[in-house]
Each structure stands twice: as C-alpha cells, then as structure tokens.
Amino acid sequence: MVEVVKGALSLGLLWAIMTIGVYITYRILSIADLTVEGSITLGAAIAAHAISSGMNPYLGTLIALFGGMAAGLCTGLLHTKLKIPALLSGILTMIALYSINLRVMGKANISLLRMENVYTVFENMGLEPTWATITLGAMSVLVIVCLLYWFFGTELGCAIRATGNNPYMVRAQGINTNTMIIIGLIISNGLVSLGGALIAQNQNFSDIGMGTGSIVIGLASVIIGEVLFGKRNFFMRLLSLVFGAITYRIIIAFVLKLGMHSNDLKLFTAITVAIALALPMIKDFVNPPKISIGEGEQDA
Amino acid sequence: MLRIDGVYKVFNPGTVNQKTALRNVSLTMKEGDFITLIGGNGAGKSTLLNCIAGVYGVDKGSINIAEVDVTKLTEYKRAAFLGRVFQDPMMGTASDMILEENLALALRRGKARGLRWGISNKEREVYRELLSHLGLGLEHRLNVKVKLLSGGQRQAITLLMATLNKPKVLLLDEHTAALDPKTASIVLDLTERLIHENGLTTLMVTHNMRDAIRYGNRLIMMHDGRIFLDIQGEEKKKLTVEELLARFGSASGQEFSYDRALLS
C-alpha cells in the first residue's frame, strides 16, 4: 500500500513537469497542442541516446529540453507564419517527430538498464531508487513552478497570458500575438520533453510508442488538479497541476491493483477525461439552474 | 496628425461577393480634431477605422499617422500610435485577467515587453487615482477579474486603457452601441472628458445622429464607401438632425434611409 503510493508519487512528480507543459498551451494559450505526444518521446529518445552513448546524463537531459523547445518552435511557425490551424500544426509536428525519434534512437527502443542516469547521484547518497526519483522530481518541479510563477508575472508573461485570453485586445496594445504564441509553445514543449527525458531514465528505457495518449494523461492531470485543488491564484494553480498529476498516478495505481488490465488503461483515461470535460453539462442536466420568475413576468 | 490619401479597400476581389468598401477616401485630421463619423450600414465607417488600425491592409492609397507612413505596418506595430475602443465591450479587455493587469498591459502599449515585473506598486497608485475619476467605484476593484464587470464598466476601462499612454489618434468604433441608453450617455460623457483633458485627436464612429452633432468639432458622413459630407467649425455647431438629413439627400441624390439613425 505504502509502496503503491510511493511509486505513484515518484511517477506523478515526473509527469507533473509534462502536465505543466500541457497547461501552458491548453489553458494559457487556449490551444490543444498535440505536439506533446511527439516531444515527450523526443525527450526520452534524446536522453536515452545520449546516456547509452556515454554522455553525462544531466547534459543529455538538458539537450532533451532544447530538443522539445525546437519542436515547439516548429509547431509555432507552422501555426503563425503558415496560418495552419493550431490543432493540425501540432499533429504535423507530432507525426514528423515519429520519424525523427526513430532516427535519434536508431531503433524502436533503447534500454538504459545499469547505466548511470540523473538519479544515480541520489542513489549513491544512500537513497533507495524510488526516493531518489521523488527527491529529484520534487526539486525539479519546485524550481519549474517558481520560475514559471515569476515568468508569467513579468511584462512578457502577462502578454502571453493575455494572448490566450483575447488576441484582439493584445494586438491593439501593440503586442505581436504570433511571437507570444511561439514563445508559449517553445516553453510548453521544452517542459514536456524534459519530463520525457526524466521518465525514460526512471523506467530505464525509451520507447517509440511512449508518447501515445500522453496529451490525454496531461489533460486528465490538469483537470483533476483544477477540480480537486482549486484555482485561486496563479501559484496555487501551478501547484494544483502537480497535485493533479500525482493524484492521477495514484488513481491509476489503484485501478491496476483492483485488477484492471493494463491494456485497458488508455480507455479508462480517455473516459475519465471525457466525463471531466462534460462535467459542467452533466451538472446542468442533473440539477438545472433555477430561474426565478417574478409575478409580473408570468404568463396570464 | 492623421492623413489618409486616396484609400481603396476591396473585399473578396475577383469573386461574386466582391465589394468595394472604400472608394478613394481622403481625410486629413489636425491635432486636437474630434471627428464624428456617421453613415448607414455598409457605408464603410468601420472599414475605414480598421484600415487606419491596420486590421486590414489597403488596396491603394496611403495612411500617415504623425508624419509616419504606416500603410505597410502591421496592426500591432501601428498600435504604438493608436488608442482603440471597440463596439463589443468584451473585445477591449482580457476578461480572465484582473483589472490592474489589463491596465498594465495598456500602459506599455507600443513598448517592448521584457522580463521586468508586469505591474509596479507605483503604477497601482496611478491606476487607483485614475479609476476614481471615472466615478464607477472601480478604484477598489483592481484585483477583480474583468469578466465580472458590466459592459458599461468594461467600456469605461477600455477607454481609460486607450488613453493611458496618450495615443496620437483615438479610434472609437461605435463604442456605445452595445450599451443601454443610460450607460451609453455616461460612457459618452466620459469619452468627451478624457478627450478634452488629454487634448486627443479623435475619430468616433456612431450610428446616432444626435451624438454625431452634439460631440466633436467636425462631422463626416460616409455613404457607399465615400465621404459625402464634411462639416466643421461654426457650421457644425449650428447643425440640426433635419438639416443633416436634407444635406445628405442633396449630396447623395437619395434619401438617407436608415431606421436606427432616424429613430434615435
């Protein structure tokens, strides 16, 4: 039981980084960006290739971050310069990344067993593997949350937030909305790719199919976080994403423990997200908003 | 301050829906001019404003603002010169952001956005002061999301935002049309006060003939993509609705048939 929660916590912290990336496009820019399905694998692929060819794991992880940022830039350019709808731009980059990821890895999967990775330092300090992951995961998440809280409070960050909210107003205030969208996509995919690199090193392998459905997992975590942990101010919102990602992992761990076949996981996640997105409508249907009609307004 | 020379704008060229929205429009505004622009639906008023703002490029002619040729500049670059208020109260503000964030975005209009903090404490005092002059009690609501405010309040905020960083030209696109009559008149009075206090060069589109006559020092009427009437000075001060209708008839050779303008 404790082991299950501990495992979910470690995995949740790593997926939280990816979830924050999804939040930036989905909630701040109001774009459903499918690039993430490719950039999470890209991060894993870059890190795996770097580590298996003997590079320092921290350097490999950093390169993975830049790789994801480049993927975000591609989607941003397709969308803003070539005027391809955001959803389709993301799909195009995602598909292109499938080939690129195969090129990076040279094969469909790379095993990282018994190789030094970013967690090794903590394990050498005497921590067991799960605690090593939790330590590094929590540190990364904390740094990212603080950095983003600062960034989205700056002039540039405010302009990006406003772009997702009302692009007409933003242009009237002299801001290039295209640039803002591109910056947002770069940050988002950089984080997703970083998450992918950390996840690959945690599970000790990278696989070409590991990105499939990751956008849905990201969305599920965003929504769980918002529903359960509120959205009072921006700092709390960022933290709620972390708690959302962890909660998602705990839920998954429990349904697996209750006997659900792991092949059915994606179906389960998709249904959960569909229900969560439909919640406002379901609420209105079950409990219609009451409209009070005054005496004078009633039909005679 | 604003010089428009022989501007043409054609929508959907080469298709059955081709429409010439502006035909050889020329207009020069002096500094401090307050022009009211009136005309029926499809006369080209909003198109003209959008061409000045850079929402649409022009097909022929040129536009100069403060001696700068902006004809080829994008919308966000021209924003450095322009303050804009739209017809839709939802359009001028970012609804999910709080009031002070909206004002801070507007204060930096036309300036590069860096990694400095988005709002300084000094600014907050200025905002509170300026909002208190609006008389809508908004000075206590700096931390409220703009979507929780009424249409009239949002239009007043958009006006303040447009004038916060003094624009070369203020463009008002029927900014009171979506408001109820009482709120509309409050916002119009506020408009006049802000224009007067800041000495702003203003182009205001309106559907309402009385407002067009009452406000500003110059009145322009458009019809079918052309400027038909340009009345200013003493003549404008003495103008009445009946006279305006008669003059429009003799200038265009047809009756001014626009029910909303007649009824108002």
Image: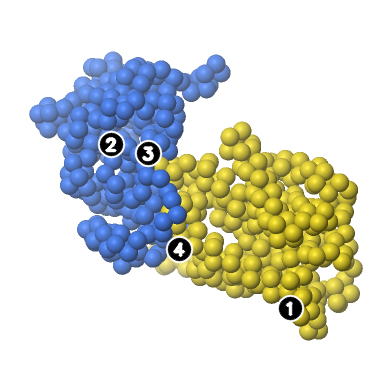
Q: Is residue B93 left or right of residue A141?
A: left
Can marks 2 and 3 be said to lie on one chain?
yes
Question: Residue B70 placed where, x, y %?
Answer: 37, 28
Circle 1: element type:
loop
Circle 3: element type:
loop
The residue indicated by pointer 2 is B169
Chain B: its colour in the image is: blue
Question: At 74% from the left edge and 59% from the top edge, which residue is drawn?
Answer: A56
Q: Which mark is residue B79?
A: 3
Q: Looking at the picture, which amino acid does disc 1 mark?
A: Met
The residue indicated by pointer 1 is A125
**Closer to viewer: mark 1 or mark 3:** 1
Q: Chain of mark 2?
A: B
Question: At 24% from the left edge and 30% from the top edge, which residue is drawn?
Answer: B1
Can marks 2 and 1 be said to lie on one chain?
no
Q: Give the Cα separation between the discs numbered 2 and 1.
A: 66 Å
Circle 4: element type:
loop
The residue indicated by pointer 4 is A298
Q: Give the Cα separation between the discs numbered 4 and 1.
A: 76 Å
